Image: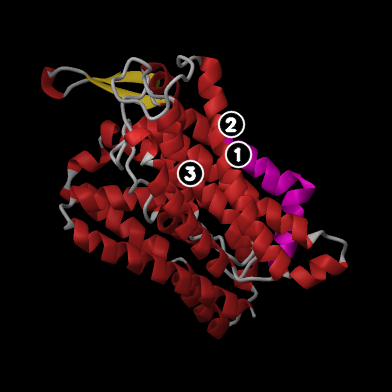
Amino acid sequence: MIGLINRKAEEYRALDSIDRRRFWIDGLLNNMLYILMAVFIIFTAVINKNFVSPSAIANIIMLAAASLPMALGIGGCIVLTGTDLSGGRVFGLTAAITAGLVQNRAASKLLFEHLPDTSLGWILAVLVIVMLVGAAIGFVNGFFVAKFSLHPFIVTLATQLITYGIILMFFQINGNGGGPIGNLSQEFKNVISGPAIQFAIAGKNGGSDTMVSIPWYVIYAFALVAVMWFIWNKTTFGKNMFAVGSNAEAARVSGVNVFMTTVLVHTLAGAMYGFAGYVEAARLGSITAATGLNNECDAIAACVIGGVSFVGGTGKISGIVLGVFVLRIIFVALNMLGIDPNLQFIIKGGIILAAVSLDMRKYLVRK
């Protein structure tokens, strides 16, 4: 970091007055989104002191951890200059499958009868099942994108609709009639959303202490971040992914299997959606057909805010993590400021538009 700062300082000193002005202007414009968000966060903290309370910070960490797997998955699709519109529905389907498979066997209304009692082995088996379901849908996406040179937007839009149809049929199983799937086993909740870390915050003026808990899925999410960082930065697959995203034809000439790389990126993304759906079932405790609606939009926004470029071949896991946290902080701040929930959709759309516009500007300047 110090070496980078020194190098930037040397580059700045080598510029003339006109180039120095351009240096500052470009720096401000390229980082304008972060600057505005920082101002907004400070403003919220001043207006509502609870925004920086330990419980609020813990809540932001939990929300970010639940969102990370989807963003980590869809980030690879964006690196390939694509996207994935099916992510939210795959998330919803895998959450529903998880809920159906880990219902309390003593519940009066079960989606699947004659399943084994929930044990650690069964809980892990369900995770494998839903990640395979997500990976299968991702494989379909990647296959059609790579084999027939179809645009990911069209392919994933089609699989989004197909997956939604499967969700609606799934909720009709065993006379469920489209109702929510709930009554999940306590063992499952304990392993996923049960407290992993607990600490007490002393109350003010002699008041009672406040207990703050960090659930297990936060630990799992950051372990997943470490795994994805290794895949992106230390494996041949990761290097091939960035090569294909930068220039698919040049990568093909260099010996990269573009077809296999594209399929694997989408398959891995689907597996990440499955993991996210699995966690969501434990977080909510009751899953409906609407679960996961538009979740891919938040994941895409987080990736773009974190520097994963739609022009392809650019992105870092650390940037995705930062983008997820920034987005979650903003959403929590909007709620604490009492912003109308309907207006929040407009703000989310504006954030995405601004992030993509600034990303394209940086690309055009480099070009």
Q: Amino acid at mark 2?
A: Val
Q: Are marks 3 and 2 in contact (CB under 8 Å)?
A: no
Q: Which residue is mark 3?
A: 68
Mark 1, Cα crowd under 10 Å, few <14 / some 14-19 / many 20+, is many
Q: Which secondary structure class fits the magenta region best?
A: helix
| Up-down relation of residue 60 to residue 213 (above or below) | below
Tell me the residue at 36%/18% (across/down): 186
Q: Amino acid at mark 1?
A: Leu
Q: Position of residue 201 (x, y in %)?
A: 26, 22
Q: Are marks 2 and 1 in contact (CB under 8 Å)?
A: yes
Horizontal relation, residue 70 to residue 265: left or right = left
Q: Count every numbered label the image shows and give the total.
A: 3
* Distance of label 1 from label 3 (alpha carbons): 19 Å
Q: Nearest the camera: 138 or 3?
A: 138
**Is any part of residue 318 visible from this angle?**
no
Residue 305 belongs to magenta span: no
Q: Position of residue 318 (x, y in %)?
A: 56, 48
Tell me the residue at 58%/61% (across/down): 78
Which quarter of the rendering shows the C terminus? bottom right
Tell me the residue at 16%/58% (across/down): 340
Residue bounds of the magenta highlight: 224-245
Nearer to us of marks 1 and 3 is 1
Return the disc, 1 or 3, that comes first in the chain's sequence: 3
Mark 3, Cα crowd under 10 Å, few <14 / some 14-19 / many 20+, is many
Q: Nearest the camera: 18 or 289?
A: 289
Return the disc, 3 or 2, that comes first in the chain's sequence: 3
| Up-down relation of residue 171 to residue 365 (above or below) | above
Q: Which residue is mark 1?
A: 132
Horizontal relation, residue 361 to residue 257: left or right = left
| Up-down relation of residue 193 to residue 136 (above or below) | above
Element carrying mark 3: helix
Residue 241 belongs to magenta span: yes
